[in-house]
Image (cartoon, helix red, strand yellow):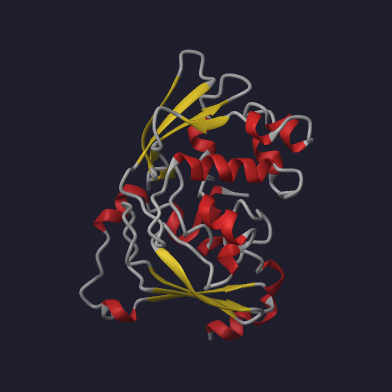
Amino acid sequence: MALGDRGLFGFAGVAAQDAALPDDAAPADQQVFVVPSGTETDKTPDFYESGYERVSDGSADIFSDPLVRLNRNFEIVPGAALEWSGNEDGTVWTFTLDPNLMWNDGNPVTANDWVTTFRYGADPAHAWDFTWFFQGVMKGWDEAIAGEIPLEELGVRQGANEHELIVETQLPAPFLPAMLLYSNTLSAAALEEHGPLYNSNPETSVSAGPMKLAEWLVDQRVVYEKNPDYQGSLVVPVNRVVIKLADPGTWFIMYQ
């Protein structure tokens, strides 16, 4: 998966705070981003549900902030984590989370969300199709996906408080923050209450990101709307995202 797949939302970073519409742009309430996506990849909008069957890579992973982002100069900048640091040998990483982030069901975004999400990704019962990403990197990951250790022994845990996340690695990993561009968390509470793929249904979907799920018509379209409860730093100059699900052979005709 190329970094370019971060799409409309993943690369904006801190620079997006300065986003403003040109003078000749349509009114804000008419700002709609329309993108096509194949019907064979419309299982989920969430990376930790499926890396390869997400609806429209360019508009996926927008129901929470990743721990870090890239800015326009391809530098790692804060996302859900305001700051981070590694220990002396680069095997224990501490991320300080933004305490203002909230899920739109009223729950705070906490370290437990990431702990639950990483454990979910490593759970052999989940059979996540992107487990290779953390193999050889996160402590206990290889053993967990093989079913050799309990998920509780995975090298990710809450730190001193609910807004401190600790990630341990197998070897010194100065590259870990960059890997965590792919760290849009699931809601631990929603996953427990509704189970897998809860974000594929507007009735159970929960968002702490800039957009929320408004509609999901199988093999037709997926619609996101701006999340009024979003407390993060990302400013997105569109009010709706419409993902049209269709055979790629029809995309150019749709564009015309």
Q: Determine the residue positioned at 38% across, 46% down.
A: 71
The one nearer the camera, 202 or 235, is 202
Q: Could you say where residue 87 lies in the image, as x and y percent from the top left?
A: 46, 17
Q: Quadrant of residue 170?
A: top right
Q: Quadrant of residue 49?
A: bottom right
Whether residue 162 is visible here, answered yes or no, is yes
Q: Could you say where residue 226 lies in the image, as x and y percent from the top left?
A: 37, 69
Q: Name the residue furthest front.
A: 193
Q: Determine the residue positioned at 54% across, 37% down.
A: 179
42 in relation to 136, above or below: below
Q: Viewed as shown, does residue 114 lie left or right of 98? A: right
- The number of discs equals 0
Q: Name the residue furthest top.
A: 88
Q: Determine the residue positioned at 66% across, 55% down.
A: 50
Q: Could you say where residue 256 lies in the image, as x and y percent from the top left?
A: 53, 86
Whether residue 187 is visible here, answered yes or no, is no
Q: Determine the residue positioned at 42% across, 32% down.
A: 95
87 in relation to 207, above or below: above
Q: Name the residue furthest left.
A: 23
Q: Viewed as shown, does residue 78 lie left or right of 128? A: left
Q: Could you say where residue 10 lies in the image, as x and y percent from the top left?
A: 45, 53
Q: Viewed as shown, does residue 116 lie left or right of 30? A: right
